[in-house]
Image: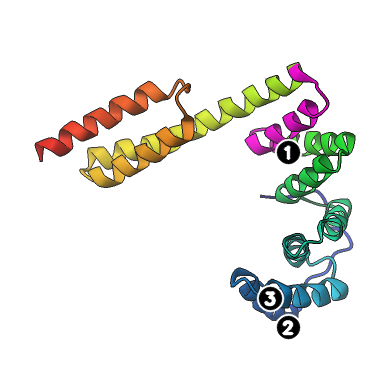
């Protein structure tokens, strides 16, 4: 997810730079990390305001065992005015592992003002408090994240209901099976999911 706070001072990449980035990304997704890193590095030196390249550069640095360098690139991304939520998540994980809890918490709280329904942001903020033995605050944040995730599960539940209504039983069963695995045994959604699964099994047996 991308949230733009400011884009002053940035410039657009040229068609050649976009083409080279596409080549680097293709190498990246084909597990040629070092080769892709070479391309991303040159592009980052040429045009650090090319944010898509900067983030891919940071990921390539991280996946090739250079987390400190990746964090430095991500810090620049956030300081320069583009607020990438995925960048916040990645950098906050690094800060938490480095026991820089105050910096992680401040960044996550800022991101939550723009994406308050993101359960991963809440989870990471809870982790910063848990690592500092702030049990009540961590539990409150985790409960909030869990509630959001349960609401999100309602979407595939509705999808499964539509599959059932129009006779696509195998797709409906697959969707419900994924939901059941996701929510766990203590979820308040589980009874509704199990009832729908029972109905699907009965309808399948009648075919």
Residue at 83%, 71% (x, y): give it. 44
Rendered image: mark on residue 24: 3
Residue at 89%, 62% (x, y): give it. 9
Helix, strand or loop for disc 1: loop
Question: Magenta stretch: residue 105 in it?
Answer: no
Rendered image: mark on residue 195: none
Image coordinates of residue 59 in percent, x first then y, are: 73, 61
Q: Is residue 118 visible?
A: no
- Along the line of sight, which residue is nearer the eye, 192 or 180? 180
Mark 1 or mark 3, whichever is nearer to me? 3
Q: Magenta segment range? A: 113-135
Packing grade of label 1 (10 A; few <14, some 14-19, many >=20) is: few
Mark 2 or mark 3, whichever is nearer to me? 3
Asked if labels 3 and 1 touch by Cβ distance under 8 angstroms, the answer is no
Question: Magenta stretch: residue 125 in it?
Answer: yes
Which of marks 1 and 2 precedes in the sequence? 2
Residue 80, compared with residue 186, is above or below; it is: below
Residue at 86%, 56% (x, y): give it. 68
Which of marks 3 and 2 precedes in the sequence? 2
Q: Is residue 13 left or right of residue 23?
A: right
Residue at 86%, 76% (x, y): give it. 46
Residue that numbered label 2 is attached to: 16
Helix, strand or loop for disc 3: helix
**CA distance separating discs 1 and 3:** 31 Å
Q: Is residue 57 left or right of residue 179?
A: right
What is the quadrant of residue 145 in the picture?
top right
Residue that numbered label 1 is attached to: 114
Total numbered circles: 3
Asked if labels 3 and 2 touch by Cβ distance under 8 angstroms, the answer is no
């Amino acid at each position: 997810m991308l949230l733009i706070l400011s884009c002053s001072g940035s410039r657009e990449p040229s068609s050649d730079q976009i083409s080279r980035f596409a080549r680097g990304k293709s190498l990246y997704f084909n597990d040629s990390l070092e080769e892709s890193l070479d391309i991303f590095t040159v592009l980052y030196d040429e045009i650090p305001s090319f944010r898509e390249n900067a983030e891919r550069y940071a990921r390539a640095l991280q996946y090739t065992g250079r987390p400190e360098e990746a964090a430095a690139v991500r810090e620049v991304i956030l300081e320069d005015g583009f607020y990438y939520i995925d960048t916040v998540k990645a950098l906050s994980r690094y800060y938490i592992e480095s026991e820089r809890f105050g910096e992680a918490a401040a960044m996550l709280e800022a991101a939550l003002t723009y994406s308050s329904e993101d359960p991963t942001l809440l989870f990471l903020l809870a982790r910063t408090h848990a690592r500092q033995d702030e049990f009540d605050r961590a539990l409150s944040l985790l409960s909030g994240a869990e509630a959001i995730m349960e609401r999100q599960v309602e979407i595939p539940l509705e999808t499964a209901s539509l599959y059932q209504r129009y006779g696509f039983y195998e797709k409906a069963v697959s969707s419900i099976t994924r939901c059941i695995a996701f929510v766990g045994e203590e979820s308040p959604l589980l009874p509704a999911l199990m009832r729908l699964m029972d109905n699907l099994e009965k309808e399948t047996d009648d075919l």
